[in-house]
Amino acid sequence: MKFIINLFASFLLLLSFSFTQLHAAGEMKEPMHPDWSFEGPLGKFERASLQRGYQVYTEVCSGCHSMNLLSYRNLIEEGGPEFSESQAKAMAAAFEVKAAPNADGEVEMRPAILSDKFVSPYENEQQGRAANGGAYPPDLSVMVKARHGGADYLYSLLLGYVDAPSDIKLDDGVYYNEYAKGQKIAMPQVLYEDAVVYTDGTAATPEQMARDVTMFLTWAAEPKLEARKRIGFKVISYLLILSVLLYFTNRQIWKDTH
Amino acid sequence: MSENYAPKSAVGRWFNDRLPLLNLIYGHLLPYPTPKNLNYWWTFGGILTFCLVTQIITGLVLAMHYVADADLAFASVEHIMRDVNYGWLLRYIHANGASLFFMAVYIHMARSLFYGSYKEPRELIWIIGVFIFLLMIATAFMGYVLPWGQMSFWGATVITNLFSAIPLVGESVTNWLWGGYAVGSPLLTRFFTLHYLMPFLIFALVILHVWALHVPGNNNPEGINVVQGSQDTVPFHPHYVVKDMFALVVFLVVFAGFVFFVPNLLGHTDNYIEANPLQTPEHIVPEWYFLPFYAILRSVPDKLGGVILMVSAIAILAFLPWLDTSKVRSAKYRPLYRQFVWLFFANVILLGYLGAQTADGLFLIIGRIATAYYFAHFIIILPLLGYIEKTKPLPKSLSEPVLSPEERQMKAAASGASA
């Protein structure tokens, strides 16, 4: 078994090298680490939190940020918020999309249906920039996987708005955030007490909203997370049993060879 | 051995009389005489074959859903992750499979270095291996470009720009590679084509690699010649088939650990940001398995010089059988080489570490020393060692080193008396 230990040790050594590098690069505050239900080998999302998170995204974030890799049908799929079909249809219908050209070649608007992608706040990137002082609010579909620190980082960033130290001068449209790189960010603070009124009656504290929307974004970036961990657990159990059987088979075969 | 094989079924005999394919497979897989003392470092050949086949099969299915166009590639990969049945599994196996493939190949190469497997009469096996490694590098690099994330795009830009270092025709060559004046759709499409082709070339070379191996037979930890079919060998099946399977399953546990529980650990977060030609990432870092070569590239202030040195770092491996002047294969019997080979491994890991750092200040100085040492190992240390090293006496056969201390003492006493 020495070879596995050796192999693993040298490999982990290499990995740790690359991580120390990444941490040194950013010079930002170490993000907070709330207890995420989706962590660990058998982690799952909290259904209610995902549903609240969708509400926060729609009512707060979606004013500026698109999520154009998601469709409304994803909201009813297993392992996600698991809204009922009628709920998701109603959610989709709250948005309007361009219909296919009619017989006269005119393009009219129609309510969105389950198969439509999440409706974007802006027609195009230029419009998004124009509306936000030149900074384009990035798409959030895979944001959790596109930032070092993932869910912890996003959660901390949403809650990281504090008063800037007096020696720091901020330009127009730039905000002070402890967790942002260089402590400066173009996004203003959005999560204030009761920024949304949760339909399930949960108290909408900034921490609660940050938690819910980060959970929702984690699911959006990794919609098959629950299936992945469930299958992985079975696969590894199977392989471990097989390896024990093979170990003894191997010993049996070699017992007369000296 | 293989000549004596007769299929049991009538259909098998009919087929085999017309095309002795079964003979070939039988001879190479079943009774093939293998040294009885191969340790677990020897199981990586089988593991690598598994890796290659896995990459080809998962890649084939991924290619059915992937779109090689700069505007669509990123979304098509996400389509695979979200909408294709078990697409996430295929992609994570393929992406992590590449990393584990390299992990296994580095171990396989290190084993060859340690036990002198590249030496006469196995030089050609080693050289074919170097070509396989070269093709693997090209395949992996092009594969990393396909998702068209930020690292894909900027990695492709940095590496293809290296060709502009060629004197006189550099710029023309680069534009020819790009199929235009910048990295974009034409490059992506041709990288996809080549990424699809190369694994099959690797597969062909693997067949040659194994064929060439089966002529002299395996080297072994003692590094001595064994007589095929003697007491020193065992039939490949079942002894090594089962041992290799056990090692493979243990390897698969590690593999599955990555795929199912930390599938993005070995990747870079920036590659989940769609390629943007107008925004350069803060650090452009290659995949971990290229880092030592990246460090060598950056240790030279001149672009052309860096490229030449990086290519030489791989090319020099092909000359290893003649750079190493010692007749003794295994490091077990070479007290000096044994220390230098570990130093060499440590130096490569150090280069890998430096490849992930910004190339300035102290890192750059250490990088230059490590690069110099990398080459010194091949062109100074190895040739000299053969002349100055006093090697330990080699055992006559494989049975000898596994004798108990008492038996060895008796044997030594007996041979002393007869001398």
Image (spheres, coloured by chain):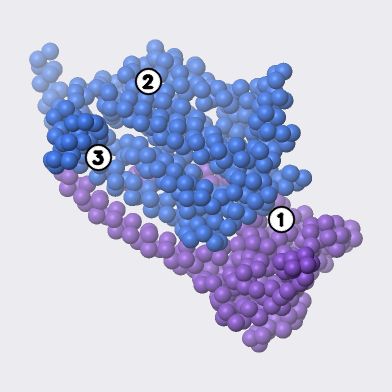
Chain colours: A purple, B blue
Circles 2 and 1 on the same subunit: no
Taking the spot 37% from the left edge, 39% from the top edge, the residue there is B49
In the rendered image, residue A43, in percent from the top left (x then y), is placed at 49, 68
Taking the spot 49% from the left edge, 44% from the top edge, the residue there is B99
Circles 2 and 3 on the same subunit: yes
Q: Nearer the viewer, residue B191 or B358?
A: B191
Could you classify mark 1 by the number of other residues whose Cα lies within 10 Å: few (under 14), some (14-19), or many (20 or more)? some
Which is more N-terminal, label 3 or label 2? 2
Is label 1 in a helix, a strand or a loop?
loop
For the residues marked 3 and 1, what is the alpha-carbon distance in whole angstroms? 52 Å
Could you classify mark 3 by the number of other residues whose Cα lies within 10 Å: few (under 14), some (14-19), or many (20 or more)? many
Q: Which residue is mark 1?
A: A28
Type of amino acid at the residue the image marks with label 1: Met
- Protein chain holding label 3: B
Q: Nearer the viewer, residue A212 or A75?
A: A75
From this view, report whether residue A86 is shown above or below residue A123. Answer: below
Taking the spot 29% from the left edge, 53% from the top edge, the residue there is A243
Do the CB atoms of the residues marked 2 and 1 lie less than 8 Å apart?
no
Is label 2 in a helix, a strand or a loop?
helix
Q: Which residue is mark 2?
A: B123
Type of amino acid at the residue the image marks with label 3: Tyr
Instruction: Give the image quarter of residue B170.
Output: top right
The residue sitting at the front extreme is A103
Q: Which residue is mark 3?
A: B240
